Amino acid sequence: MSFGVPSILRWGAVTAAVLTLGPTARVAPAQEPGPVEPVEVPLTLRDAVAEALAGNSGHRIAGSRTSIARAEARIATGRLLPSLEAGAGFTRSVDPVFAFGTRLRQERFTEADFALDALNRPDAINDCTTDVGLRWVPLDASAWAGRAAAGSRAEAADREEAWSAERTEFRTKALYFAAAGAGAALTAAEAEEAAAEAAFELFRRREGRGLLTEADVLQAEAELRAAEAHRLAVARDAERAREDLALHLGWSVDRVPVPVDSLTAPAPPEPAAAAPSARSDVRALAAAREAAVSDARRAGLSFLPRLEAFAGWTSHAASAFEVDGSDWTVGLALRWTPFAGFEQIGDRQRAVQAREIARIRHEEALRVAHAEAEQARRDARASRAALEATRAARRAAAEARVLMRRRFEEGLATAAEFLQSEARAAGARGREVAALVDYNVALARLELVAPVAPGAAGSEGGADGIDEAERELR
């Protein structure tokens, strides 16, 4: 496509008009607007847990399952209570039996109704009825066992919801610690890059005075570029960690959480801890086992007879809103179903095997819970030792860095030794941050699988936190 002079003049006129009109001019957009820049939202750990419990889809589903189980328990209880029914109806017919009975019920039967013609070919008759019925099964052993099974299933669902909340809280803490640690790691990476840049400038000045070679400066520049690449990678990891936390909280893509609580190193919990059988997931399986036992009992008791009671009152009238006659009925009935086409036998066999499965799952959960509690205690001790080791290494590397810089300035250390000391100090800072995150996650997992008594875990104060480490980095 080519543009002639008239076309250029027209484009120039349009441009001048737009510039002259200023902000009052409106030009149709040529394309859709770009993505909205996400808003950073400061978030504490406590608020993060609350947001996760309210917005996490898995935990909301667990809550709905608990409501369903409780409703089923109410249904099972309702089968043991009397049921009351009421109704009204209208019937018009020339059926002889209907006509004869309706006149009796309406209390309008006369001698004329005994005529053969009236009995064989009656006129059409209306019957407006109102009835109230009461039914109750006071004695049904299988229904009582079914109620116990439904109650245990509701308790199991409640424990599962509690376990879902505890797992959601643990997951939130782990993601929050990861995001906070990534932010601290980014601070350390920025300090590392600043130190590498200062070293590069120092090498250039010393090269200008003839104290270092070009190879030494190139090596310092390589360290600077490596520190820059490391800082970019850590920044990307920090962004992903915050996005993972936002996704877990159920936030939209236009909001990004920014942890504001600094990680600390709490004191390890006391050795004494609650029994793994007190865990919510194990208690849920125990309740499910009780439900299976009650269900097997229900299936066995279904072979026994049941006693039913019933009562009713009915009114009859030739027209609506009137009562020509009424009657009532009460009674008892004993019902027994000794054979129902193998349905009861199959139900009993199924319930017995379900009871066995529930027993195996509960016993396996207890065994796994014991193992997980011991493993979590070992992991907490190991991560605590690793944290202390990395802190000692960071302090030693920091002191060595100061001494090596002094030796380098005095001409007693080589450029390679100086750069190696700088790199060792930078790496020690990053490893300390990672160890601090691992320790906090290990404590959170220990709290999940083997909760300790309140007040058993303390804190060593701010000197053990990342905030202290960040102040030292600056």
Image (cartoon, rainbow, N blue to C red):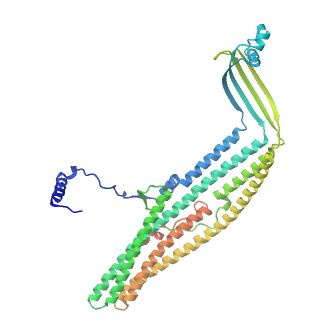
Q: Is residue 470 left or right of residue 439?
A: left
Task: Give coordinates of residue 346: x percent, y percent.
Answer: 79, 49
Q: Residue at x 37, y 82 (%)?
A: 222
In the foreground, 66 or 313: 313
Q: Nearer the viewer, residue 280 or 315?
A: 315
Between 77 and 336, the one lying in front of the other is: 336
Q: Position of residue 151 (x, y in %)?
A: 69, 46
Residue 275 visible here: no
Count of residue discs: 0
Is residue 474 shown above or below 23? below
Asked whether, in this view, residue 2 is left or right of residue 389, the answer is left
Q: Residue at x 60, y 54 (%)?
A: 162
For the point 52% across and 66% down, the residue is 459
Give the quarter of the figure containing the C terminus.
Answer: bottom left
Could you tell me if residue 240 is visible in this image? Answer: yes
Q: Residue furthest top?
A: 112
The residue closer to the viewer here, 34 or 177, is 34
In the displayed structure, would residue 32 be above or below residue 302? Answer: below
In the figure, 261 relative to 59: above or below? Answer: below
Snapshot quadrant of residue 321:
top right
The quadrant in which residue 450 appears is bottom right
* Quarter of the image where the N terminus is located: bottom left
User: Outermost residue toward the right?
Assistant: 338
Q: Position of residue 374 (x, y in %)?
A: 65, 68
Where residue 288 sits: x, y (%)?
A: 70, 53
- Give the residue displayed 73% in from the left and 45% down from the top: 146
Where residue 117 sits, quadrant-wise, is top right
Horizontal relation, residue 163 to residue 101: left or right: left
